[in-house]
Image (cartoon, rainbow, N blue to C red):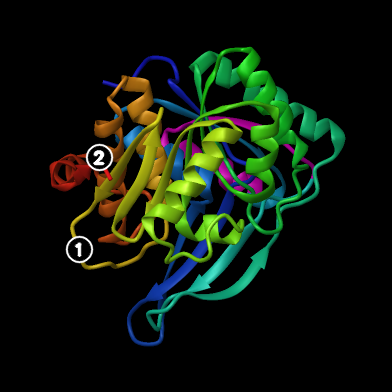
Amino acid sequence: MPSDTPTVCVFAPSILVTVTIEPGDEDFGDIHFHLGGQGYWVARLVRELGERPILVAPVGGEAGQVVRGLLRSTGLDFAPVGIEGSSPGYVHDRREGDRIQVAEARSPDLNRHEVDDLFARTLQHAIGAGLCVLTGKRPGDTLPTDFYLRLAADLAAADVRTVGDFHGPELSAHLEGGPLDILKISDEELAADGMVADAEAGEEEVFGAIDELRGQGAEAVVVSRALGALASFKDVAMRAVSPRFHVVDTSGAGDSMTAALAVGMVRGLSPEDSLRLACAAGSANVIRHGLASSPADLISRLAPLIEISRP
């Protein structure tokens, strides 16, 4: 049963309004309105897995009104920070099968007062929950990178546990400001950051990057890969292998893993069980449409199928 008070605070630099045109009858399409963005997807699956998240994000303009309305309809706890600019969004056309972007509106610049309000609101709810999931910026998000540095320092000072799902400047800033309890990062992101040669890097090279990140302040690191993950929890290296399911859409698999890792931390699961739950959540995501929206029952059925071994 979900807690009466939030157990996970999820910080999102932005929440998007997404409009998707799906195939319909004859010349007409079905138009769907949803919320999008890494933070929203993480919060949604945290709740599906039985915990109570509270989502903190800036919202504004006409798109912000849509965000508030859609979030009310989901029942998710939401701590919005009002901004003058309009929340971002995009329009996708999927009538031919592929996802074609028709239009996109980027995130607005936040003024100093809005950044301060967002920082204070995030810290407030993170302290209340005792655990904060931090997600990275999308292309076009203009939140100052030192936001992550300051937040890392203050979360550590308040003894708030942290799960990070980001890379690049946000990750570097956070690790400069304070430690991460768990970092979830993909092999593609490691390659983008120059920590491995490419996304097809071998296990030895990936574990070398994991060791480097742990030396910088990430206490546990989980690297998502095509069929599972490589991880290190407090010097214990692990390999997780997922069944080879038919893939429908890989988008949202990493966010599903992050949500599961946060749930595992709230429940005090062992590293093996947390990794197994995370990989099951990722697998459940890729075999169906809908980002980070897999049912908890499916994830629990898949978890025993994840093979955990020591390299």
Image x and y of residue 246, in percent? 21, 68
Residue annotated with mark 2? 276
Q: Residue furthest right?
A: 112
Residue 46 belongs to magenta span? no
The residue under the point 59% across, 27% down is 179
Residue annotated with mark 1? 245
From the viewer's side, name the closer residue of 2 and 254.
254
C-alpha separation, residue under disc 1 versus residue under disc 2: 16 Å
Image x and y of residue 65, in percent? 63, 45
Residue 77 belongs to magenta span? yes
Image x and y of residue 56, in percent? 59, 32
The residue under the point 59% across, 64% down is 90
- Find the magenta span and give its range: 64-84
- Give whichever of discs 1 and 2 has the lower sequence position: 1
Residue 65 to residue 178: above or below? below
Residue 1 to residue 219: above or below? above
Mark 1 vs mark 2: in front:
2
Q: How many marks?
A: 2
